[in-house]
Amino acid sequence: MNKKIWLMVMILGGFFWSASRTGATVIDEIALVVDQDCMTRGEMEDSIKASFLEQRLNPAAPGTAAYEEAKKNVVDAFVQEVLLAEEADREKIEVPDGDVDHQVNEEIDNMKKSFATEQEFEDELKKENIAMDDLKQDTHDKLLRRLKANRMIQKERMELPGTATVSDQEVRQYYDQHPKDYEQVKFSIILFRTNSKKGPAQVTEIEKQAKGLLAELKGGADFAEYAKKYSEDEASRERGGLIGTVYRSELDPALAKGIFAIPVKGMGIVKASDGVYIIKVDFKGKADYESVASEIKDHLKKEKQSSVLEDWVQALKKNAFIMEDGKVVKVADLPKKPGVPTIASSAASQPSASNNAASAVASDMESSGTTEISDEEIPKGHDYPTLPDPGSFTFSFRLDGLNYGTQDLANYYGPTIKTSQGFPFGLGADFGMDLALDQTIQVGLMAEALHKVPENVTDAAGNNEIRNANTVGPLAGFKILVPLDEGTNFIISAAGGYMFLLSSSVSIAGPTTAPLNRNANLSDGSLGGIAGADIEFFLDNTKATSLDLGMAYRYVKFDNLKTNVTSGNESFPSPLLNVDGSKASIDFSGIQIGLGVRFYLGKNE
């Protein structure tokens, strides 16, 4: 198969057709079976070669360590893709035909661009005995499988335990245990590239040239000018070779060792896999904890999230039929790699080489974290994504329907007078802010307002009395959070404070034969409290917003009522007394049912 056909293989990620050079279709040997799908020997070899070509490396020979590693990656990528696509079918995840057809057309167009003319492309297909319809169908099937797998993995990410909980203690522990990861260096480079095509003599000549330039630089030559003139790294060349400040962990280990061995304001030569570097070091130091804490926290969260997702993928493998080279494969024989599984081409499963110095020298910190967090390093009690981080705040808003079961006017007038009151007997609202002392205990303050539905009575003289009651006040309390699963908490809460009667009054209107209109404002203050339980359902994937449904018992009773008559000539006793001589009261006590929302601040960062 010629070079242009190889480009087509790479575009499709190596999962391609197999055909003979003479034009006669041949049956290729089955190399890998995963449930109802399979990969031929030709497809596997193409994928392995493509993985090297994508990194601009010559394909390794079968049997070598590099070849076997590439093969394992190809096998694992195919197994994951097939199983995830099957899971997507079971979950009834749909991929619109339009999405697939659009990508198929793009893939075919990209293949055509590898040829001088479209006719040359068609001639090559005929030579390889590949019909255009077959090419499109084959491309369609493989892209559909990949899209299904991608959407399945995206769905699982959305259903993961949100942003996994990482405590400040874990962050500090990681920082202390990996001191070298946060050593920093600011440096510039002049790069002379070496690769497998350059023989030992050429490499020796490159090293000799680098040593000569280094001597001139130490003699006073301008580093930036030499970088612009000699460096083969395009990205840094225009900046005079400047890379900037990076962490040790972002560098290739061999390169990092050489760079950190050079003193500040010094220069030296460092050999790496991609070439010979002349290095000038401007600064070395260590990042302070505060400046990197958020990065460490994100890194640890992703590690925890990745572990959950990888375990899920491994569980899919346990229930699958997998046969490689005619032998049934056990799940333990399949590689389990750290990090969140991604579905792409088999070639893409290999680390990519970069064209610019910033990427070639400094890899992404997330992928370079080589130390895994063991179970022993993770403090117990930090495994629930529904719980807040210690020291974080939660804002809440709640509405209540109040079922008091008491009628104050009935007590005031006695059993001979009939009173009435609407249902529910009252409504309430509160706003609160809680501080997490740890993941399960919160303390906080809230402002509360309660409204009691007016009570009505008509006395023996025909006078109608309406009593309105409203109370407001601050309360302090605590909550205990008990995680039930990855999306639900059980909350036990209690609070107490001082409540004030506000805009509470008694209005009396007499019959038309004996007009009587009076209004008396009521005032009092009293201690009160509430205790109850809620079920909390999270509404988002980061577990930052929840809906609460709960029941509680409230005790708030005002029994030292004072009045101030604002109209009419008659006065009301103060304090008010019931017909039996006891103190009249306004009682907000009783069972309540509430619905609220809670916002965990900082969880979606």
Image: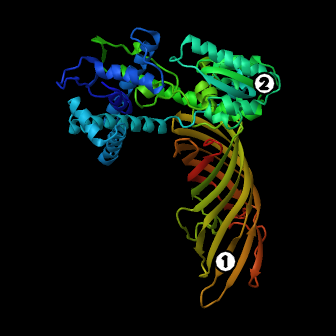
Does residue 52 appear in this view? yes
Residue farthest to the left?
A: 24
Vertical placement of 362 versus 419: above or below?
above
Label whose residue precedes the other's in the sequence (2 or 1): 2
In-front residue for pair 350/229: 229
Numbered disc 1: secondary structure: strand
Residue occupying the point 67% across, 86% down: 516
| Looking at the image, residue 351 lies above or below residue 61 | below
Residue 150 drawn at (x, y percent): 40, 36
Q: Amino acid at mark 1?
A: Ser
* Between 150 and 307, the one nearer to me in the picture: 150
Q: Nearer the viewer, residue 122 or 370?
A: 122
Residue 603 picture quarter: top right
CB atoms of marks 2 and 1 within 8 Å:
no
The percent coordinates of residue 299 (x first, y second) are 62, 30
Tell me, for residue 432, which label it has, or none: none
Q: Residue at x 56, y 39 (%)?
A: 490
Toward the bottom, the furthest residue is 513
Q: In the drawing, does residue 358 fall left or right of residue 325?
A: right
- Residue identifier under label 2: 217
In which quadrant is the C terminus drawn?
top right
Choose mark 2 or mark 1, whichever is in front: 2
Residue at 64%, 55% in the rendered image: 589
**Figure colour scheme:** rainbow
Residue 440 x, y percent position in the rendering: 64, 34
Judge from the rendering whether residue 426 lies leftward or rightward of residue 485; answer left or right: right
Name the residue tied to disc 1: 507
Q: What residue type is disc 2 on? A: Leu
Taking the view exactly as shown, the residue that stands out farthest to the top is: 63
Whole-percent x and y of residue 297? 65, 32
